Amino acid sequence: MDKLLTTQLYKYHLEQKSKLIDFAGWEMPFSYDGTLKEHNYVRNSCGFFDVSHMGRLIINIDEIDNISKLICSDIINLDNSKALYTIFTNKNGKSLDDVIFWKFEEKLVLICNASNREKISKHLNINGIKFDDQTFDTCLIAIQGPDSEKLMNNLIDSPARFSAIDNGNYIYARTGYTGEDGFEIMFNNSKLNEVMKYINDKNINPCGLGSRDTLRLEASLPLYGFELSEEISPIEANLKWVLTNKEDYLGKDKIEDELNNGKHKILKKFIINSKKIARTGTKVKNNNINGVVTSGNYSPILEKSIGYALFDSNPESDLIEFDIRGNFIEGNIINKRFLS
Amino acid sequence: MTEKKYLETHEWFSINDNEITVGISDFAQSELGDIVFVTLPSVDETFSKGEGMVEVEATKTVAEVYAPMDITISEVNNKLDSEPELINSDPCGDGWIIKGTIKELENIGMSYQEYESFIS
């Protein structure tokens, strides 16, 4: 096995005695104080995540028309200093990666999933788009939770929601992946000590990938490799709202076919009232419509088992049945978000 | 009450007369992470050695607790219904899982020292 990559915070993770796991080829913290505790830090006050494993590609603004041809959202008419969640589609209209762009006057910052950094880099290269991969030269820290703004305001000025700022020292945006207010801050590796001193002085607790997953699932947010993949389109993942690119882009014809004929798989959220978690890969049925669980876990706020399942076609009712290790367990599709 | 013995499947058990108490080891709870649901068997249910008796759902994964020998359930730790985290906080004490009547006593299991070297 190749040696795992580590972020600049690796020593910190070791010092904090976090449980480390292999995540997309990176040795990353799964938890420090326990997933449920960390989940509650973020829901109730604030926590920080080392997300430096995610790809950070800097693209000159001159390339914006070329980028637009590869993504399903309108980046051309997006204002400067705004963040955009979008999906790189393939020629079949399925998902190569779900990413965030931060748009500035002279550049785009593309934040992609760690597992897809090489794939997206290759995709940009094939399409003649120049970029500077700063993944290894910079850190990326996510500060999440209702107290984030208050705790971070001595380090950074707060942008509006889904806006981004480049102040020369930090490039950051107010987005998030937990359903809470929060900031993603990118900075040169040389600034790590300064940032960590600030975070420690403010007693912001570290959180690992375990709570990142329970938080994003509870916040009804998809995870690439589970709810999205090269076999799953944005429409199938129930992300029609990202389809704002009116110009032509890779796979647009296939996506429009799906929209017009309605023949596609469909992702649904579910709740199980019994003490069983339907984990990734669990088979599920609605009458004769088959599905498979893409993600399933415990919701600490609802205190219930929740998840996403991808059905072959639109279920006819909300009652579904899982096959959990040979036991048939009932669940319900829910159409609203898990958290109101 | 005998000294606790440990199994390769990470249960601990202790025996008092003909009654066995079973839980999971500190190592097992630590590997599982936060335990959120425990599905307990019913009193009087019988299990053969090696059969799954209990399902422990954690945020990270799910684990089964296997019967160390042929037993009939005599008591379950009902506290785990509302406080499954007791297995995390006190796996070898308040986080015990089931008690059972032993059908046939077997001389099995590792000592704590043996188990420690097994997991390290």
Image (tube, rainbow, N blue to C red):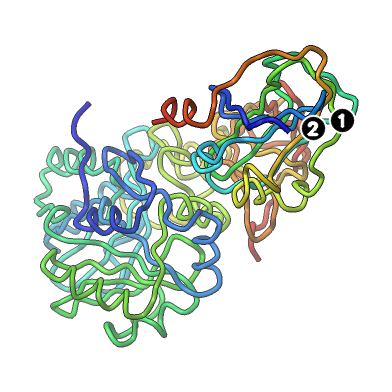
Quadrant (top left/top right/bottom left/bottom right) for the C terminus of chain B: top left
Number of labels in the image equals 2
Q: Mark 1 lies on which chain?
A: B
Rendered view: A221 above or below B61: below
For residue B109, which quarter of the picture? top right
Verify CB contact (< 8 Å) between mark 1 and mark 2. Answer: yes
In the picture provided, is B111 more to the left or to the right than A158? Answer: right
Say if residue A171 shows up in the picture: yes
| Residue placed most toward the observer, A289 or A44 | A44
Question: Which residue is label 1 attached to?
Answer: B74
Q: Residue at x 20, y 39 (%)?
A: A118
Q: Which residue is drawn at 13% across and 78% down?
A: A168
Label 2: few (<14), some or many (≥20) within 10 Å?
many
Q: Which residue is drawn at 30% across and 55% down?
A: A13
Callout 1: helix, strand or loop?
Answer: strand
Rendered view: A116 above or below A7: above
Callout 2: helix, strand or loop?
Answer: strand
Does label 2 lie on the same chain as label 1? yes
For residue A115, which quarter of the picture? top left
Quadrant (top left/top right/bottom left/bottom right) for the N terminus of chain B: top right
In the picture provided, is A298 more to the left or to the right than A9? Answer: right
| Residue placed most toward the observer, A293 or A236 | A293
Q: Which residue is drawn at 44% across and 25% down?
A: B118
Mark carried by residue A50: none
Residue B84 location (% of width, % of height): 69, 48
Seen as rendered, the residue at the extreme right is B44
Three-letter amino acid code of the residue under disc 2: Lys
Question: Which residue is label 2 attached to?
Answer: B99
Q: How far apart are the alpha carbons under marks 1 and 2?
A: 6 Å
